[in-house]
Image: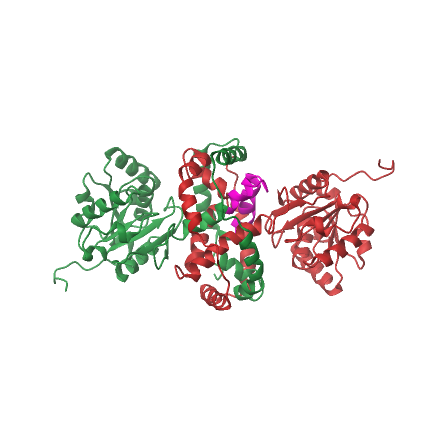
Chain colours: A red, B green
Amino acid sequence: MLAEDAPAPPDWGNPPAVRVAVVATGTIGRSWIVAFARAGCRVAAWDPNGNCLADAVAWARAQLPRAAADRVIPCERLAACAAGADYLQENGPERLDAKQAIYRALTEVAAPRALLASSTSTLDITDISALVSTEDQARCVVAHPVNPPHVVPVVELLGGRGTSAATVEAAARFLTAVGQRPVRLTRYVPGFLLNRLQAALVREAVHLVATGVARVDDVDAVISDGLGLRWALMGPFGVANTNADGGAREYFTRYGSSFQRLWSDLANDVRLTPDLIERIGREVDAMYPAVSRERLRAWRDEMVTALRQTRTPADP
Amino acid sequence: MLAEDAPAPPDWGNPPAVRVAVVATGTIGRSWIVAFARAGCRVAAWDPNGNCLADAVAWARAQLPRAAADRVIPCERLAACAAGADYLQENGPERLDAKQAIYRALTEVAAPRALLASSTSTLDITDISALVSTEDQARCVVAHPVNPPHVVPVVELLGGRGTSAATVEAAARFLTAVGQRPVRLTRYVPGFLLNRLQAALVREAVHLVATGVARVDDVDAVISDGLGLRWALMGPFGVANTNADGGAREYFTRYGSSFQRLWSDLANDVRLTPDLIERIGREVDAMYPAVSRERLRAWRDEMVTALRQTRTPADP
């Protein structure tokens, strides 16, 4: 039973009511700062490397309007960063021992009711939280973003064996309120959803290049001037639904045997050899002969934002 | 050697100089009419079913400004449609015997230099053209569009054993000139590029739903609010290039072993059972509770056009 003077939980659907701590401020962490502060949260930030923290805070503030920039607070110590935070987003190194150490430290300094969310892309939160108490495990959750989260909204949410349903619900509510799109996994699978789906496409793309069926630029164009134009609007199930008069049921029934045949012909055994990687590298360079990688990356993020602004709902 | 009075080949890079015949005017054929007439071509159209032809021509003209609509000419007979055409786009039924019969008929009525392009999505042009002369085989080529081609630019181009390199070159030049994005395959593979890449993604998406890891709407959101936002700009190789400071070489070198591990964990054995299809159907219906499939399809095409207009090149 909670003590009578325990603080009430924050209103997760109201970002200004939620105090956030961003723990470790590399590429992902600094983008999280922007996403949270933009939505109205007070964001305390900490990194074990003081220069990294200073760079991250300067960069994040430069992305934000003045009022939001003022909500970003760099902290010299983890304890100060965590103090009073309702939601902590951890972005430490992607090694189990490092994550376990961070989670032990977080449970010592965070307020007892605070949520402890990890940006891990590969680890199981059951393992990450293995060294903390059962009570603390209940508030640990994976919130894996796409890089950078202030541009791409999807966040993969999943609990571990000890995570409470209320923790996952609260994290989903909060992330939705700050403008992200949380998606739920019922259990841990390697690569979660996003990296599995990406890996499936990449495997066949690499196979088609490796076997000489097509060049890198032509395989890429099939996506960017073909399938990708729809996938910016709908996933594979939504696309199936619009590809038959009777919707997804008719589509998968009518083309079921075609899919089964094609699936049995797709590449399962693809090897990324150094020669193949070098060939891919050369053909990628030839696709973008006159533009730096830095510019390409900035263009990608500007364009993703523009595409999101262009999209209107199907049912206005 | 050509007779001295043989007509000069058209300037494939100048659509108004190219006279097109669209042979069979179902969903794909009528969209091709719009793509060609919009670009300035005179487009003769024929279908064995007179009502289908009339509907297609009326629909196509309604999509086009007046001057372009006037360039669309319905023909009662195949011979009249083909007469004088430089480029024929065939969109008949997807059965080998039907295609072979159409190609025999086309070679009898088409001008000797005309290109004979097929919209087939599954058949090998070597087989389709097996019953025509070696000379005629040289001018047969697959030009497989995405539905609808006047909205989505990618066209998969590939020759058969008898196709001349000049035919593939001319088709690529012409399709580029009318605003499509031709991609080349060096040889026939089932599903070409597009349906293979789509099938690879769909297989893993179906697997994640079938095994209860995530719901249909969450898997779809990983694409539409995640990976798809980039894939509307770049294919998997272009994305890899922006995901590491050292570009695609560094990306595939650094994450090579992660990919290999993930590839070995992806689903290879997925079965589209009636129960699974019904579950997918129900979850798709729940994603779009308040909008008709007809409206969804119109929205999809409007949005694809809007996204294409929003995109600007990385190197302006």
Residue B180 visible in the current orientation: no
Residue B309 point in image, percent of width and height: 45, 50
Which one is in front, B145 or B75?
B145
Q: Is residue A271 above or below residue B67?
A: below
Extreme residue in the left direction: B4
Quadrant, the N terminus of chain A: top right
Vertical arrangement, residue B30 with respect to residue A149, above or below: above
Indicate the position of residue B22 as horizontal and vertical percent values.
26, 45
Furthest residue toward front? B269
The number of callouts visible is 0
Q: Main secondary structure of the magenta part?
A: helix
Please give left or right for residue A7 compared with residue B26 in the image. Answer: right
- Give the residue displayed 25% in from the left and 44% down from the top: B97
Please state if B150 lies on the left or on the right of B167 as rendered. Answer: right
Q: Residue at x 54, y 63 (%)?
A: B252
Residue B298: x percent and y percent? Answer: 43, 38
Q: Which image quarter: residue B62?
A: top left
Q: Tell me if residue B209 is in the magenta stretch.
A: yes
Q: Residue at x 53, y 31 (%)?
A: B289
Is B251 within the magenta?
no
Give percent across and percent down for residue A236. 49, 43
**Could you say which is closer to the camera, residue A251 or residue B261?**
B261
Judged left or right of residue A100, residue B17 is left
The answer to whether residue B27 is visible is yes
The residue stretch that appears in magenta: B204-230
